Structure formats: structure tokens, C-alpha cells
Image: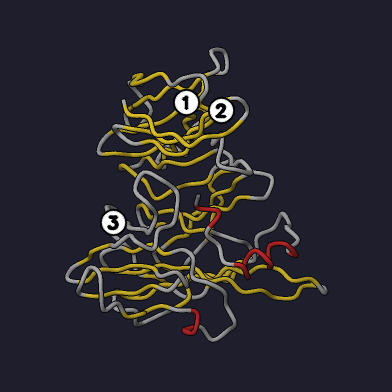
């Protein structure tokens, strides 16, 4: 799960952080605009929200990956000779773990986390940076006294999201056209890098474990959130596949719909012993079943 990938130091900082209602932002430098149709790549497992050191992203003649230390590397070979192009050592201040990267066909965007003392207490500070595809021309886009994660890029804006330890979410946008500006988008919304046109997959709230996501679709143009129910969702091709829990019948249904949430169709009904679903794809789902009080991992084809 995306929220589980942060490094040890970041969690220690969050533990002592005092969250205020005000986001303090330092706008650093004017940015060059990305195209409205920018393709955006990340390093999470397809159909899931788990970070993967095995994933490779190919852009041009290079393959990109993130190693176990949160460093971005690239190579002309898919499986060997990777060289680090972004690491914590690149900063002029003490930072912890590059845990988020978004890569386009022109730029790399990434976060680093540091802390600062405010009235005797340590607070997390997120630094959002960019560089070209060979790791050069690094510059800071924005610094904020919040713990952001990079979500996706759409129409010259990078979307960042944050969740709290009680499961609530918040999403902001940052302009990549001219001076970087941070704007609040919506409460109770956390976005993922799964987008079809103006529609982005997200969640309305996070659980403490992997169960019960509030899956949703965010319509960027209308600033509208479309709820899909309690479950997981994945964008595959031109369809969204998702698990939705029916409280009355006490079971999950696997469904699909258009990216705007229209034309919902039931694909399968899961056994009532399925406690929660952790992954949804076009042909199967994964989750946990309860039998005589014990949880067992299962894979269900349909």
C-alpha cells in the first residue's frame, strides 16, 4: 500500500509532528509547462498501490527503476548496469529517502523529506524537486510544511495528496506553468497515478490496515468526486474494475464501469467469507477470506 513505503526517518518525523490547519509554502522557481496530454509513470505495481523495486519504466533508450534505498537509477539494459541519478546526497540539506517519483517523457519529479524545529518541536517539511531525464539540472519546485505524496500530473499541474493516521485525506494541486503555486483541491480525497483523460482514480479515506478503501473517481474538469463504494479499484484500458461491498448482502461484488463512473456492470459476486479485497484486475482479484475465525489469503478468477 502506498502509505506503507515511507522510510523509517520520515515516520519518526511524523510521530513528533504537530499538524496545523495552515499549509506554509515556499514557492521556489518558475517552471516550464508540461503538455496537457503528458504521460506520467510511477514505480508502483500495476493494479495495486504497492511500491515495487522490480518495476522498470522505459523512456527512450533508458530503463528507470527505484532501488531499495529509494534512489532513482537508470540503465540501457533492463536488468543490469543501473547507475544512480537521484539520491539523498544530492541535496544541500539533510533529507530522508526519496520515496516518490513521477517520470514524464521530459522531466523527473520527486520528493524529499526533512525536518525543522518550530517552537521546540520537529515538523516535517516536504521538498518537491524536478530534473531532466539524466538526473541533471536539479531544482526545487516547492517546499511545504506538510507530508505530501506525489499523485499524478494532468494539464500542467502536479497533484499531491496526504493522509493522516486516522484515515482522512487531502489533495492539492501545484502549477507547473510559471511560478509554482499550491492550491487545495478537495478534502477526503487521495489520488493515485491511474488516469484516463480528466478522470483520476483515488480513495476517499484510508483504513489502518489494508481493508475497506473508499474507492472513488475524481473528475478534474468538474472538480467532482464519484464514489465507487468500499473496495479497491484499478484502471485497465478504458475501463475501471473495482470491488464494491454490499452491506445488505454482506458480500463483495466485482464490477466494471467507464472512467466517468457510468455503465456499471457486475462481473462477479464473491463468497460471503471474503473479508476484504486487496487487489483487483481484469480477470482476477486477491484478498482475504475468513474461515473459523482465521484469515487466509485467496486469489479468485472470474
Q: How many marks?
A: 3
Marks 3 and 2 close (CB-CB < 8 Å): no
Q: Is residue 224 visible?
A: no
| Residue bearing mark 2 | 290
Q: Which residue is mark 3?
A: 38
| CA distance separating discs 1 and 2 | 18 Å
Q: Is residue 196 above or below residue 88?
A: above
Q: Residue furthest right?
A: 120
Q: Is tag 1's residue or tag 2's residue first in the polypeptide sequence? A: 1
Query: Residue 271 at x, y = what percent?
Result: 46, 19
Nearer to us: label 1 or label 2: 2
The residue under the point 69% across, 58% down is 22
Q: In the image, 66: left or right of 92?
A: left
Q: Nearer the viewer, mark 3 or mark 2?
A: 2
Which quadrant of the figure contains the C terminus?
top left
What's the distance in space between the residues labelled 3 and 2, CA to CA? 43 Å
Residue farthest toward the left in the current orientation of the protein: 61
Q: Earlier in the sequence, mark 3 or mark 2?
A: 3
Classify residue 95 as left or right of residue 166. left
Which residue has dot 1 on it?
A: 244
- List x then y, in percent, for residue 152: 40, 54
Name the residue at 39% across, 54% down.
44
Query: Residue 27 falls in which quadrant of the image?
Result: bottom right
Q: Is residue 189 above or below residue 63?
A: above
Residue beneath the point at 68% across and 62% down: 14
In this view, the residue in front, 179 or 189, is: 189
Secondary structure under the numbered disc 1 in the rendered image: strand
Amino acid at each position: 500500500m502506498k502509505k506503507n513505503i515511507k522510510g523509517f526517518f520520515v515516520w519518526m518525523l511524523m510521530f513528533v509532528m504537530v499538524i496545523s490547519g495552515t499549509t506554509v509554502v515556499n514557492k521556489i522557481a518558475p517552471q516550464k509547462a508540461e503538455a496537457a496530454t503528458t504521460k506520467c509513470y510511477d514505480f508502483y505495481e500495476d493494479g495495486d498501490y504497492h511500491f515495487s523495486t522490480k518495476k522498470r519504466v522505459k523512456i527512450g533508450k533508458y530503463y528507470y527503476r527505484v532501488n531499495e534505498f529509494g534512489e532513482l537509477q537508470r540503465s540501457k539494459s533492463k536488468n543490469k548496469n543501473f547507475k544512480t541519478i537521484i539520491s539523498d546526497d544530492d541535496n544541500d540539506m539533510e533529507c530522508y529517502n526519496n520515496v516518490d517519483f513521477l517520470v514524464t517523457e521530459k522531466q523527473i519529479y520527486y520528493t524529499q523529506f526533512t525536518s525543522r524545529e518550530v517552537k521546540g518541536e520537529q515538523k516535517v517539511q516536504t521538498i518537491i524537486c524536478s530534473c531532466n531525464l539524466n538526473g541533471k539540472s536539479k531544482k526545487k519546485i516547492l517546499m511545504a510544511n506538510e507530508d505530501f505524496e506525489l499523485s499524478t500530473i494532468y494539464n500542467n499541474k502536479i497533484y499531491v495528496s496526504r493522509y493522516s493516521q486516522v484515515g482522512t485525506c487531502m489533495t492539492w494541486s501545484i502549477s507547473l506553468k510559471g511560478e509554482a503555486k499550491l492550491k487545495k483541491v478537495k478534502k477526503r480525497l487521495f489520488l493515485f497515478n491511474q488516469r484516463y483523460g480528466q478522470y483520476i482514480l483515488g480513495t476517499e479515506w484510508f483504513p489502518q490496515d489494508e481493508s475497506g478503501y473508499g474507492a472513488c473517481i475524481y473528475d478534474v474538469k468538474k472538480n467532482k468526486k464519484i464514489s465507487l463504494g468500499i473496495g479497491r479499484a484499478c484502471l485497465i484500458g478504458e475501463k475501471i474494475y473495482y470491488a464494491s461491498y454490499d452491506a445488505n448482502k454482506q458480500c463483495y461484488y466485482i464490477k466494471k464501469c467507464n472512467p466517468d463512473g457510468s455503465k456499471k456492470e457486475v462481473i462477479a459476486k464473491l463468497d460471503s467469507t471474503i473479508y476484504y479485497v486487496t487487489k483487483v484486475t481484469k480477470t482476477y482479484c486477491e484478498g482475504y477470506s475468513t474461515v473459523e475465525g482465521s484469515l487466509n489469503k485467496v486469489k479468485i478468477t472470474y
